Amino acid sequence: MPVDDVIGVHNPARSAEVVGRTATATPYEVDRSVAAAGRAAAEWARQPVSGRAAVLREAAATVEAASAEQAPLLARESGKPLADCRGEISFSAAVLRWYADAAPGLLADRLIDDAQGRLTIRQRPYGTVAALTPWNAPVVLTVLKLAPALVAGNALLVKPSPLAPLAIGALLGRLAAHFPAGLLHALNGHAPTATRLVGHPGVYKVAFTGGAAAARAVGAAAAAALTPTVMELGGNDAAVVLDDAALDDAAMDRLVLAAMATAGQVCMAVKRIYVPRARHDRFVADFTAAAARVVRLGDPLHPGVSVGPVISAESAGRLRALTDDALRRGGRAVPLGLMCPETDPSAGHFVRPTALLGLDDGAPLVREEQFGPLVPVLAYDEVDEVVARANAGDLGLAASVWSADEERAFAVARRLDAGFCFVNTHNRTGMSLRAPFGGVKRSGHGREYGAEGLFAYVQPCVTHAPAAFREGGEGMAPGAYPGTAPPFSPPGP
């Protein structure tokens, strides 16, 4: 097999180590998989929702059983701490069970039979769905598409990120055994594979999680085929600390990890922190102390490590350039946490977790999504001011408000341009399977999680018998209802 047809996956904690290799799907394999998925989807959609849900529950048990084997593999290819990888896999099983339980009720036909007529609304699956998933949480971000798409009656073709395709590829292979042949596929590759899959005439919906550059390419290919998309993109998420916030040690620990988990490489991580000017210095001291408690930078397989390397040398270089720029602008760097003594930082793509102080909102580290373990801490004076500053920019994925007054926190949250706003927490500690998640502005469209995450994979189809034309109805005079035109009559001679 030619070298270009093989994807080599490297360990970001020990960059010389090849974790594994996987083959790139050929155009023929993409076409063949789409055709097989279409045939399987037609049969699968005819199964009752309760039967599809039962298969999802079986799949959940398989995911849990695979954790001991797949979590270390996921840690080695993604750089995420082993405990986080176990948690991701466990949460993925919970996602499968949630949709298995919720789908029968949510997808049931709605019947309205009253004086206006008889109306049924059924939820029809799209048929064949393509899912393009990222490297930073490949298992759960795949399952968040797989669970609702399959239980709704679709087939699914997954193209994982080439940076971390191994654990999710192995898991998809196990899950496929639960479903009819051809219903679930994994197609590895780079941009050409994604483009062929997204633009394929046999694909009727595309779900994408990732960055803006890839999203534009995916969107263009989907638009050319008139294929609808759901996209969860990046965020420059603000944590707004109000002047009455009760930040005890537990709250500070949550806030630190909300910024630093997965080395900050999470779309909904805290990317910037706004603190009342009068509390700024004390906040920085408490934030630094919390980091000393909970941040251990090191190899993700070492016990006690909570922050691993970033994914690549390119990412590490970009983050160092952002830090250098912040320092040139007069900013001050405050290193956070401790380095695990068993880890050789020169062996991998390690970036020291750091708080940056003294920056204005024009600094790239503040203005852009840094996607790494760097966080600016910024002082503000008035609530109106901080709302305007938090809302600046084109992104609006998530945000958080920290306050001792819950009503006040909810009131401020309503003013923030964010698809999901946490209160007194942020990032994964604030997620809920029932709560729809997604962005506003340039942070994407559509939603995952909750009922909305299921409805992303179905289309409402209607059957309607108006009362006027049912047996015993009196008929409808032309123009009797507002907006109704009389029958067309050709002009006279």
Image (tube, helix red, strand yellow):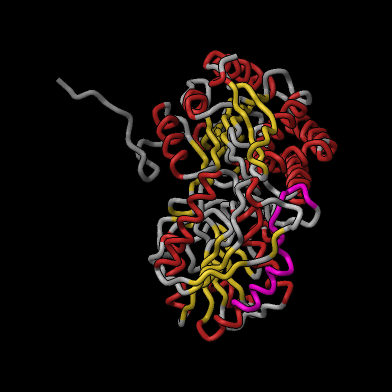
Is residue 376 shown above or below 283? Answer: above
- The segment highlighted magenta reads 284-302
Is residue 394 shown above or below 219? Answer: below
Q: Give me the residue at 37% from left, 45% from top.
A: 482
Is residue 88 shown above or below 374? Answer: above
Horizontal side, residue 217 vs residue 485: left or right: right
Q: Is residue 185 visible?
A: yes
Is residue 280 shown above or below 39? Answer: below
Task: Place residue 470 in its image quadrant.
Answer: top right
Q: Give me the residue at 33% from left, 36% from top.
A: 485
> Within the magenta stretch, is there residue 293?
yes
- Where is residue 140? Give x, y as percent: 68, 43
Q: Nearer the viewer, residue 203 or 261?
A: 261
Quadrant, the N terminus: top right
- Where is residue 233? Give x, y as percent: 51, 47
Task: Place residue 410 in its image quadrant.
Answer: bottom right
> Within the magenta stretch, is there residue 261?
no
